[in-house]
Image (cartoon, rainbow, N blue to C red):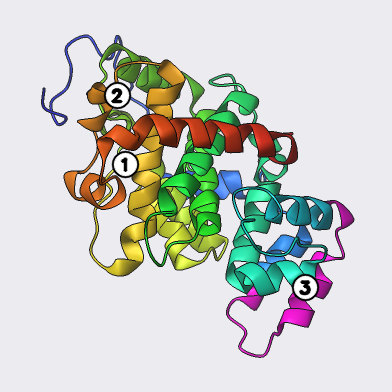
Amino acid sequence: MSDNRVLDGAFDRVFDRVFDIDELIGDTEHLVSFPRVVMSLLQTLNDDYTDMNDIAALIKQDPALTTELIKLCNSPIYYSANQPVFSVEEAIKMIGTEQVTSLCLALCACGATSGLGNKVIEMKDFWQHCLLTACISSVLAENIPAISGGAAFTGGMLHDIGQLPLFYQYPDESIQVLNSCQLHIDQRIVNAEKQIFGFTHEEVGKRLAEKWNFPPQLGLCLSSHHSGIIKTDADKLAMVVHVANILSECLETQEDPELYLELINPTALSLVITDLDSLPDVFEKASSYFDDVQSSILV
């Protein structure tokens, strides 16, 4: 079935409302509140004169964030045969300043978006999907050179954040979009959104990532996790998140993986999963990661 044609009966009424992405972003901005420490960290990414000690000092201003950062750096997602991490400085040395900053974003995301609670989906359910996608991304990244499990985790955790403004501002239309996709597994959510809103949650995510000064590779995870299209080596992280997003839906529904593999960009699939027989192991390991870190992430 073509993704581009309107599905018969998919939408049971016509919406004549005009949707404006600029207005949506403007109305959303004051409802999302990342901690001051995190926003300061994002600013340091573009400052050549900021060193590790400056970044560590910023993070340590938030004791709760410091604790959760160290805990996550000692989880299976990051920790292997290295020495345990006991301080923010050690975390930065182990995974780098950009990854530490991105990880702080992931750790704060649930609380920062609490103002976008809505009648479309329980926020806990939304973030559980994001966390499962993050854990699958981390497992998949283990076999891809130059992509760390931590970067993949953060990309997976934040990939769907563009949905929340749509859920909050346009709940009735968002419910219609989700109902359409539940009825037709091959109806891509971005196509349904395009038909109703004129833009997609990927486009909203891209705009938010730019407004909040997210690192470019992280922004790609928000803006292309459904397409999985690769143009440069820098896009590989977004491809991992694309594959993980679809696999997380498969794991959540417990349906035949073959149904979901057809939805994955072929180029992304061949890069990220070289052996389809390994999928049960990926699911098992990711589920274990999920159990290990959910208490730190979900609020």
Q: Above or below — where is 146 with respect to 202?
A: below
User: Does residue 18 appear anywhere in the picture?
Assistant: no
* Residue 7 in picture, x, y percent from top left: 18, 17
Residue under label 3: 89
Tell me: residue 63, above or below residue 226: below
Viewer-side residue, 114 vs 23: 114
The one nearer the camera, 60 or 224, is 60
Q: Residue furthest bottom?
A: 49
* Label drawn at residue 226: 1
Of callouts 1 and 2, the N-terminal one: 1
Assess disc 2: are there few (<14), some (14-19) or many (≥20) residues with their C-alpha within 10 Å of its C-alpha.
Answer: some
Q: Which mark is residue 194?
A: none
Please state the horizontal and vertical placement of residue 138, each as a whole percent of the image. Answer: 49, 48
Q: What residue is shown with label 2? A: 257
Is residue 151 shown left or right of residue 182? right
Residue in view at x 77 percent, y 56 percent: 70
Q: Which residues are magenta?
A: 43-64
User: In the rendering, at what x and y percent does residue 197 appear?
Assistant: 34, 34
Residue 257 visible somewhere in the drawing = yes
Mark 2 residue type: Pro
Residue 61 in magenta stretch: yes
- Please, what secondary structure does the residue beneath circle 1 have? loop
Quadrant assignment for the C terminus: top right
Q: Mark 1: which amino acid?
A: His
Q: Is 72 situated left or right of 205 in this image?
A: right
Cα–Cα span, label 1 and label 2: 17 Å
Say which label, 1 or 3, has the lower sequence index: 3
